[in-house]
Each structure stands twice: as C-alpha cells, then as structure tokens.
Image (cartoon, helix red, strand yellow):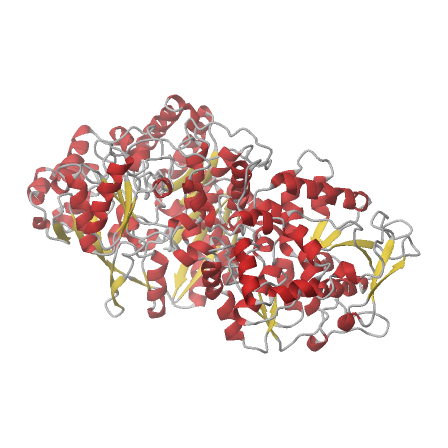
C-alpha cells in the first residue's frame, strides 16, 4: 500500500492481526484491498487503516478496543462511510458496524420507541415503523444506506428536521464503551461519567453563552444539553461527538407520528438568496420540510436524467412540504403557504409520483453536484455551513462574492428552513495548502460574522476541526478537550478530529495525483483521463443501497454479498490507489476488487456522480494484459463471436457434443467456463445461413409466410436499389432501415431477427443487413481487449458508413450490442469522424417504432407481462420508451428491477455460478414464479433469457416477438401486414 500503518514487516503484521482475529467472533482484514476500500469515506481525505474489523457483538467491540490500546492503535467507528467531513477514516483499526451489528433490538409501536444497534440502516427502521404510522424524524438524503450509528455520530438532520428535530432531539439513551473500554449507559444522569457533574458546574456560563445559539449549531460538541435547564442529558450531549468519545453499542430512540397526508408545494424565486429571504413567511405556515434548490443543480439533473417535471418560473426553488390529517387539509395549508410566500410562481404538486421525482433531485444533490456547471470536479469541504435562518439571504450573497473572489464555483442546495446550505465547490485541492486553506479560513470567518456554524449537520471531522478556532474562543476549545478527556483520556478514539485536530489540508485524497498517460484504451472524453474518471467517486455510497424498488440496478454483486469490495465505491477506492501509485495495476488486490463486477454499467446511470465502473474495469484489463498472456476465458468468452462464427457451420455437431455431460464439463473447464453451466443450444440454422444467397448488398430481406415454422428466408433484389448505401429519402418508395444482426441473435435466436424483419417491413420499410459479418466488439471490450474491439468497430463503420451518411438509421435487437454501438464506439474511436454519427444513428427497436406515425398497438389486454430490462439498456439506452410501448398494449406489466445475474460472460466464467444464481434469486426468479406460467416473460437480452431458461426452465420472448406472437394476438395477415399494427 505504500506505507506501514503500524510498523514492522508484513509477516509481523500478519501475526499481530491473527492474534486479534483469535479474540473475535467477527472478521479482521488487513489486506491491501480492504485497506484501500476503507481508506476514505465520502470526504476529501485518504487515511488507510492498519486493519478493518467487522464486529458481530458487543464483546467483539470490547476486544478490538482492548487490542488497540495494547498496541497503541487508534480506533475509528464507521457505519456506511457516507460522512463527508472525513470523520470515518483512521490510521489504526476501523470498526465497520454495518455488516453484523445491524439489528433492531426492540420496537414498541405503542410507546413509539425503538432500540437499535449502530449498523441499522435508517430506511430499514423506517420500513419497520411505517405500517404503525411511525418514523424516525431526521431523514438525511442518504437514508437508504446511512446507519443510525453514523447519524448519532454526526447529529444528522435532513429535510424534515425543521419539524421533527435533529438526531439529538430523538435519542433517549445510549450504551457506549468509552476510550478505556468501560461500558456507560448514557441518559439523563451525568453521574454515570465520573467527573461530568463537576465539569458541567464549572462551565455553566460558557455553555449558556457560546453553545446552542440556534438549532443548526452543530460544530464542536453539543455540551449545551448538559445544562440543568435542558435536563442534563448526557445522551444528547454525546450525539455529534463523531466517534471521539465512545463506541456506540446500541441506542434508544423515539419515533414520531406520521401525518395523515402531506403535499409538496414548489415556490419559484429569482435566485437562491431571494428564496432564503422568504424563509420567515414560509415558516409561518408550519411546514415539515423546506428545501432550497438552485436552477443550476436542476440543469445538471436534467442533463443526467434527460428530463425533470415542470417547475414554476424562477432561478431557484423552495420545495415545501405541508401536512394535515387529510389530503384536503394538507392542500389547504399549501394554499395558505402560496398566499403567504413572495414567490414569482407557485405550484402545488398532488401527484405522488411527480413529488417523488422532485424530491429525488434533492436526494441526489450530493452526487450530482460533484461536477460544476463547467464540468470541473467539485468536492465537499465547505459542505454544510449554517447560519440563523434570518441571516441566510445576506450570507448567501456574501458567500457568492467570496467564491468569485477565490475563483471557485459550485451548486447550492439545502435546508433553507434551518439556515443550512450544502454546496460542493471546485476547491483547489491541487493547490493545497495555499489557495485551499485560504478559502476555507475566509469562508469560516464569513459564517462566523453571520453568527453561524461551520457545520450544520455533517460534523467537523478532518474538514473543519482545525477551523473551530475561528468559530470559538479558546475557553470553548478547552472545554471540548476537557469533555473528551472524561470519556477518552488517552486519545484512542478517532484522533485528529475535533480535539487536537489534524490540518484541513493533511491527507487529501486527490492532492498530487498525476494524470494517467493514455495507453491506447478508452478516450474518457468526459474526464480526460482514467485518474480523473475514477475520482468521480466521492463516496456518497448510493451503490450500498438496495434501490431496486425505485428502479435501480446498481451493484448486483454487492446486494448479494453485502461486502464493500463488491460495490462501485469499494472498487473505485482500490482504483484510486492504483492511479495515485500506492497499488500496482498487477496487484492481486486489483483483480480481487474487479472479480465480481458484472460490467452491468448500471452505476453509469444510478450513481449520482456518474461513475462508470464497467469502463474503468475495461481500461484496467486493457492496461494489465495488453501484449501479455491473458486468462483463458479472455480467449474463449472474450472472443466468442469468432468461435460462434465457426460453430454455426456445424450446429448439430456442437449441440450433440454439448449434450454429453463429461465432454461438456471437461470442455467448459478448459475454456474457463463454470462447468455447472449448461451450454446454450445453437439454432439448427443461424439466420445468416438460412438466407438463400451468400451475400446481398443492394437487396431486400423478405421473410416468407412460412418463416415462423421453417425459417425459410429469401433475399430478392430490390427494384428500388434499397441497399445499405441507398438514401432512404431519394428514389425509394419504401425507406431503408439497417437491421443490426448481432452474433447472439444470429446464432441462437434467428426467430427474433425474423420477427423484427416482419415488424419493420409492416411499417413500410425495406430491411437490409450488412453483407459483412460485423460485430460491436462487446465481448472484446468487456475483457479489455480494446485493440481487437477497435478492429471490429472499424469494420462496422465501413459497413454502415454510406447508410448513415445518407441519413439512415440502424436498429439493434440485442441491448448490450446496441448500447456498445451507442456509447463504446465513440469512446474507442474518438478520432474517427464516422464514429459519432454512427452512434447517433443507432436505435433500439422500441425507439424506432415509437418514432413512426399512426402506430396502433396490438391488444394484449388481460395478459401479464414480466419484463426484465437489460442492464445496458437501463444504463445507456433507457427503457422508458419500451415501457410505454408495452403499456399501450393493455398488458399488466410486472417490471423487474436489477440484473438477471448472467450479465454476458460474467455468469459463465468459472467460479461465478453461485453469485450469478444468487443475484437472479433476488429479482428475476421470484418475479417469474410469482407471476405464474401464464405470464409472458419479455426480455430483449440474450443473457436474461438464458439465465431464466437455465435456472428455472422459463423461456422468454423478445419485444419483436411479443408484438407479433400469434398466441398473444399477432400473426401475419394475407397482405403481409401485422394485424393491429404497431
């Protein structure tokens, strides 16, 4: 890893941590890969730990702490690692509570209370409480992955803290281990901590005048809760100590009652500062959430997602949620709000789906704000400053002047009702310490002038602890140190944070990272180089969330294993170690990290920071193996189209051999394929070989009436010379469309190509297929054989160029191949002027059909359709048009969110069968089993259909077949048109 965290040789460290492992029921991991994964949280800081511990119970926590004290190691507690201030990284032992200590120990709906372990994810608790009309009040945007322990550490808030309070307001009791391993039950009795009553009495004046001045004064320790008039609440004072005073074992919390109904109102203002000026009028209507969004953030969302719901006129908006016992009551309050506010325009949103989409803009803010409007990387660091709400408008105007003066920019959003603003800025990390430190200290002085706090909810951590001297006088800092000493006199717990802080510019992750010289791989057009690209991951951790209910696909292997190594962030952290020179690209740690990446591309869309791990994996494999001996599956699965071209010449022989168990198992082992996998059966005759002519440039492909049974396909010369190079707009009664005949459709499912041709011809188009056996190169791309992929893509450009230059379109049937032409082609051939126009000419079947006038969808009323969108379609092409087209048929749609688990060559490779099947068991298989045999399984992806067929014997159909299948009401009319149209 480039440094020794605790000294000694690797053998000494192995013995040391073997001794720790023997004391625990949980796991201990000090491997280079694991240390890389936990070297950062969601902040700018990188501090590789000596080892990561996954405690299973209280005893493990105590044993790990005792071991650390024996060996002089610091201890840092960690939940989901979504802290943006650098308060979840440390050089000694990092204790990850999220893997095992994640149970709700007690839940009492009558009393509205719960007791939880620190690793419980907030959304898990919310799902448990919701049927009882309850919830935990604070709800940070990371609620689908952040843990209660992390929220207690940072005193997290979220949009609805304006009504339901911060985490400290909702904690009733805590059970902790202090820095010396003593268990403390913290509630409202200060005497449980020796010396605490005396400490409080000696600091009464200081606590009353300097702390707790406004709700979002989160910087430093919340010692105001120790005051007699505030109940002398030690548990509340412990909240927000960022792991510096104790290790949480469990927490008693109170829950709030859900309102009967809520409604969202969107208020438009000229700018965010003017919106902040209106906060008093908005708050007069007792909202339960008030969030501010700058128009530039909405522009980023629009670019990321393609569209957002219509917003009122303005350059900034307040999202205000009001509540009532009934929907009418909530709407009535919203009406009063519209009258009280001074907005340019207001809109009450009653559609729950639209409201959820709008709230997602705010939830994704941390990731989407990772790029400035100019496309520069933006970072946390001055992330969540807060001022009293009545000062917020003035503060924001001066803050805009300050950022302009320092030449930094970023996107604003945040909790306007509380006076807390989030912003990510293109901070000059590379210029640390000069410009970086100068900006942070000037920003601190500005917020203090407005009576504010350096942090409003995320804690101080490594990002702001050094700045506490700007905010507080020396006696307050001394009081903080004295409070910590009561709990952790030896400074074992999270040193460098809050008390005796590390410099704000120490241990910055990206400082000094050089650009990666090109190596003949991907262009990384949006980032410039691999080093910049992998640092897109700032650690927001969306990849840790199970967001399948919201249509997400990201990190299927993580959802199956729960291991940080198997999510996008964990892999990005390892690759960041590669680009900064701490890990060689040939390290086993890199191979281990990428081993279970399915290259599903879902992170490209689902990650708000736009991390594209499939591309990074491709580039790493390219650099690692270029001109070197590769794993055997790179030659077999990675060059599969080449071998299928040979196999389709003798399909019966291949199928016979594959059907012999011993031969199949030996052959698969030799090919690097998991022997538990059946071999997909080749069609008796591939589509190309079923043609009656060997080549057909300048010909029309026509499927005969018997095609559905005997696959007799004829090629007849086109009277209009409708060749692949003909201009569809000149001299042709029937415009020409090129059908992209991918290798998998050709070899395994020619009936899909036949159905597509019938469908396309029914629209009045002439269908042509390139004479050459062209390929998108996807299997070469996924195995990092980029030179081979480029050769195939150049041949593709040669075959399609005339058609594309004439304004023609190319229709793909296999989503992964279509996505490769759309996205990978420009990345691999950025200097070829044909690449971008060809990529833009590529359409999915649904995209092509949706653009035709006069469509009449076939009637599938009463039919249930289980739909498995392909991951690459979800990530690159989008599934909205397909979804609408299926819905137009009247069918009842059951849509599967998440990967099928086969994912091209992933589920075929040796050792992957188990994880592939486990992924399928989380989505694909239960959806099909619950829908029943009568339901149609619709999946355009060959992998998706193959997985279902191999695991549960369920055959699938393609969209083209669904629209033509006689059993579903389709079929061929005497004149060759499709009944019902399309």
Seen in the picture, residue 591 relative to 846 is either above or below; the reply is above
Q: Position of residue 540 (x, y in %)?
A: 41, 45
Residue in the image at 66% along x and 62% along y: 654
**The N terminus, quarter of image:** top left
Seen in the picture, residue 901 relative to 109 is either above or below; the reply is above
Tell me if I can see residue 531 in this picture: yes
State the residue in front, 243 or 965.
Answer: 965
340 displayed left or right of 697: left
State the residue in front, 71 or 627.
Answer: 627
Residue in the image at 47% along x and 41% along y: 369
State the residue in front, 108 or 717.
Answer: 717
The quarter of the displayed image where residue 327 is located: bottom left
327 displayed left or right of 728: left
State the residue in front, 673 or 201.
Answer: 673
Q: Position of residue 439 (x, y in %)?
A: 38, 26
Q: Which residue is most to the right?
A: 719
Residue in the image at 42% along x and 38% along y: 587
**The C terminus, quarter of image:** bottom right
Q: Position of residue 773 (x, y in %)?
A: 75, 50
């Amino acid at each position: 890893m480039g440094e020794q965290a605790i000294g000694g040789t690797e053998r000494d460290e192995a013995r040391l941590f073997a001794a720790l492992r023997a004391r625990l029921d949980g796991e201990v991991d000090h491997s280079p890969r694991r240390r890389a994964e936990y070297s950062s949280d969601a902040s700018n800081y990188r501090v590789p730990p000596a080892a990561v511990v996954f405690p299973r119970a209280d005893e493990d926590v105590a044993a790990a702490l005792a071991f650390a004290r024996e060996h002089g190691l610091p201890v840092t507690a960690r939940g989901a690692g979504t802290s943006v201030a650098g308060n979840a990284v440390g050089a000694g032992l990092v204790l990850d509570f999220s893997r095992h200590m994640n149970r709700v120990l007690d839940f009492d709906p009558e009393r509205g209370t719960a007791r939880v372990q620190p690793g419980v994810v907030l959304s898990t608790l919310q799902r448990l409480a919701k049927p009882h009309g309850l919830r935990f009040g604070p709800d940070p945007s990371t609620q689908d992955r952040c843990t209660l322990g992390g929220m207690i550490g940072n005193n997290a808030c979220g949009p609805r803290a304006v009504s339901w309070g911060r985490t400290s307001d909702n904690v009733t009791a805590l059970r902790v281990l202090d820095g010396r391993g003593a268990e403390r039950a913290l509630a409202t009795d200060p005497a449980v901590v020796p010396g605490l009553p005396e400490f409080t009495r000696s600091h009464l004046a200081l606590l009353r005048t300097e702390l707790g001045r406004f709700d979002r004064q989160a910087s430093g320790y919340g010692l105001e809760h120790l005051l007699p008039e505030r109940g002398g609440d030690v548990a509340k004072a412990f909240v927000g100590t960022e792991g510096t005073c104790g290790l949480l074992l469990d927490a008693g919390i109170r829950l709030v009652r859900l309102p009967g109904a809520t409604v969202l109102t969107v208020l438009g203002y000229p700018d965010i500062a003017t919106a902040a000026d209106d906060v008093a009028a908005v708050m007069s209507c007792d909202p339960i959430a008030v969030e501010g969004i700058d128009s530039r953030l909405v522009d980023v969302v629009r670019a990321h997602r393609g569209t957002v719901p219509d917003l009122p006129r303005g350059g900034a908006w307040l999202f205000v949620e009001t509540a009532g016992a009934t929907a009418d009551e909530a709407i009535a309050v919203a009406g009063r709000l519209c009258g009280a506010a001074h907005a340019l325009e207001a809109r009450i949103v009653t559609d729950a789906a639209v409201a959820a989409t709008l709230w997602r803009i705010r939830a994704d803010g941390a990731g989407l704000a990772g790029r400035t409007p100019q496309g520069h990387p933006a970072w946390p660091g001055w992330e969540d400053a807060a001022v009293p709400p009545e000062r917020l408008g003035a503060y924001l105007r001066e803050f805009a002047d300050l950022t302009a003066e320092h030449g930094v920019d970023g996107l604003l959003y945040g909790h306007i009702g509380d006076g807390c603003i989030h912003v990510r800025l293109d901070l000059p990390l590379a210029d640390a310490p000069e410009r970086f430190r100068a900006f942070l200290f000037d920003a601190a002085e500005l917020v203090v002038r407005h009576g504010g706090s350096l942090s409003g909810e995320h804690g101080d951590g490594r990002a702001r602890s050094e700045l506490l001297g700007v905010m507080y006088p020396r006696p307050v800092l001394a009081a903080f140190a004295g409070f910590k000493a009561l709990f952790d006199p030896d400074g074992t717990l999270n040193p460098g944070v809050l008390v005796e802080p590390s410099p704000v510019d120490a241990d910055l992750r990206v400082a000094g990272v050089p650009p990666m010289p090109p190596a003949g791989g991907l262009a990384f057009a949006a980032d410039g180089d691999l080093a910049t690209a992998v640092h897109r991951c700032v650690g927001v951790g969306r990849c840790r969330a199970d967001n399948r209910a919201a249509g997400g696909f990201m990190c299927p292997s993580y959802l199956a294993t729960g291991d940080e190594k198997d999510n996008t962030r964990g892999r990005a952290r390892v690759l960041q170690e590669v680009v900064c020179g701490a890990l060689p690209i040939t390290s086993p740690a890199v191979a281990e990290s990428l081993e279970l990446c399915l290259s599903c591309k879902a992170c490209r869309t689902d990650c708000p920071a736009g991390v594209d791990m499939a591309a990074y994996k491709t580039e790493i494999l390219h650099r690692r193996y270029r001109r070197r001996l590769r794993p055997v599956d790179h030659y077999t699965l990675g060059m599969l189209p080449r071998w299928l071209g040979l196999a389709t010449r003798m399909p019966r022989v291949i199928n016979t051999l594959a059907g012999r168990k011993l031969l199949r198992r030996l052959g698969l082992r030799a090919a690097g394929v998991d022997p538990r996998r059946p071999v997909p059966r080749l069609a008796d005759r591939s589509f190309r070989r079923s043609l009656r002519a060997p080549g057909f440039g300048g010909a029309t492909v026509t499927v005969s009436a018997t095609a559905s049974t005997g696959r007799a396909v004829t090629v007849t010369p086109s009277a209009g010379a409708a060749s692949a190079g003909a201009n569809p707009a000149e001299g042709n009664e029937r415009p020409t469309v090129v059908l992209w005949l991918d290798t998998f459709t050709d070899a395994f499912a020619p009936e899909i190509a036949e159905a597509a041709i019938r469908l396309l011809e029914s629209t009045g188009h002439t269908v042509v297929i390139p004479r050459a056996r062209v390929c998108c190169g996807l299997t070469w791309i996924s195995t990092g054989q980029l030179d081979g992929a480029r050769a195939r893509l150049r041949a593709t450009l040669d075959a399609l160029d005339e058609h594309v230059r004439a304004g023609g379109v190319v229709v793909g049937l296999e989503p992964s191949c279509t996505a490769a032409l759309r996205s990978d082609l420009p990345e691999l051939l950025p200097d070829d002027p044909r690449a971008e126009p060809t990529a833009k000419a590529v359409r999915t079947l649904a995209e092509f059909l949706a653009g035709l006038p006069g469509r009449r969808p076939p009637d599938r009323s009463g039919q249930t359709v289980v739909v498995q969108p392909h991951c690459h379609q979800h990530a690159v092409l989008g599934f909205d048009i397909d979804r609408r087209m299926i819905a137009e048929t009247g069918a009842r749609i059951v849509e599967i969110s998440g990967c099928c688990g086969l994912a091209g060559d992933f589920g075929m490779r040796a050792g992957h069968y188990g994880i592939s099947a486990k992924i399928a068991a989380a989505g694909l298989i239960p959806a099909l089993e619950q829908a029943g045999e009568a339901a149609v399984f619709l999946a355009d992806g060959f992998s998706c259909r193959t997985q279902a067929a191999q695991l549960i014997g369920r055959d699938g159909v393609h969209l083209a077949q669904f629209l033509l299948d006689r059993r579903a009401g389709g079929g061929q009319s005497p004149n060759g048109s499709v009944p019902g149209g399309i």
